[in-house]
Amino acid sequence: MDFAERLAALAAKVRQQRSQIETEEATKNAFVMPFISTILGYDVFNPLEVVPEFTADVGVKKGEKIDYAIMHGGTVQILIECKKSKEPIKIEHASQLYRYFAVTNARIAILTNGEVYEFFTDLDAPNRMDSKPFLVLDLNDIDETLIPELMKLSKEIFDLDSIISAAGELKYIGQIKRTLAAQFKEPDSEWIKSLTTRVYEGAYTQKVREQFTGLVTKATKQFLNEQVNDRLKTALGSPNYPMANDSTLAATVTSEQVVENDLTDTGVETTLEELEGYQIVRAIVCNEVKPVRVVQRDAKSYFAVLLDDNNRKPIARLHFNRVQKYLGIFDDQKVEQRIPIASLDEIYEHSDALRNSVRAYLTAG
């Protein structure tokens, strides 16, 4: 496997096993050691490459240990501090990294819970670890643009100068992207005001702010949805489905009353996760039918993906408004089977069932 494939394989392992990992030691054994060995390429059982429980006395702090020190060229180059999986990592967890960074040759420090890896260096002051990471790798949502930079830390390549020179740009681009993601998910008052004053010429009153809070949130979701659609159209190229003419498409419009009263707009809030799930389903079935015919309709208790916006032709239901998420798929009798999923990627495992649903509707006419 190449680097990206190994990274995807580790991410799959994390998704499958995270519910069973209860301690920091288990996190290190199940997730962190495989990251060091399969991703970075160092032999975790060779003390000339990886030193577990690395000790370096720091001032009055005697006998403190860092979880792992990675050696390259005979010197310590990377320090790794681990925390328990499923616990959010915080900069407060990095106190030992701060101290060790100042007294070793290491230029890279990693703080991780086995799922998220935060990479630090000393951009702000020499030999003093920054308070903010220059690179954040989340195995639950891998940013593919970071893979070339991550490869520079692997044993095979190890180009420290290159990654340090790029760290400043990586740091701020990463922070900007995470800020944008947070604003898209839940825009704050400053973001709302900034966008509102660009499009609304009147005074920015409390009433206007309340009105545009909903409009900004809705516009943001629609914008992301449209961007994903455009990327899908570009990536798909020429589909395998027959090109229907206007009269055929018009015939798909139904005036039948919606059977389920749950499918209304009242009180429904569509989440970004639901939209992402919808796009995955749409991408899966688009070689059977034109993407324009695969329509989403949100409901109070689930998010429906329909063929031709027809409630009698359900392709899938996304039950995401609960702790345990479920993917609803349908058999040839339109009976729904709810399948528990831990991540959106698992939708791809049910591609055949989703395509079969669409084929059945097309065959039935």
Image: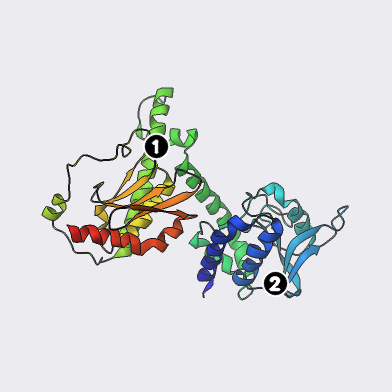
Left or right: residue 352 versus residue 242 is right
Does 109 appear above or below 6? above
Q: What element does badge 2 sit on?
A: loop
Identify residue for label 1.
216
Left or right: residue 82 versus residue 194 is right
Q: Nearer the viewer, residue 72 or 229?
A: 229
Give how far apart the Cα atoms at labels 1 and 2 are.
Answer: 49 Å
x 48%, y 47%: residue: 181
Left or right: residue 33 versus residue 326 is right
Amino acid residing under circle 1: Val
Quadrant in which residue 153 is drawn: bottom right
Residue 122 seen in render? yes
Left or right: residue 54 versus residue 338 is right
Q: Residue 178, percent across and down?
A: 52, 49
x 53%, y 71%: residue: 3
Q: Nearer the viewer, residue 268 or 364?
A: 364
Amino acid residing under circle 2: Val
Which quarter of the rendering shows the C terminus? bottom left
As drawn, the label of residue 239 is: none
Q: Nearer the viewer, residue 23 or 120?
A: 23
Q: What element does badge 1 sit on?
A: helix
Quadrant in which residue 364 is drawn: bottom left
Residue 197 seen in render? no
Q: Residue 205, percent across and down?
A: 42, 23
Q: Residue 193, percent across and down?
A: 44, 32
As drawn, the label of residue 44 is: 2
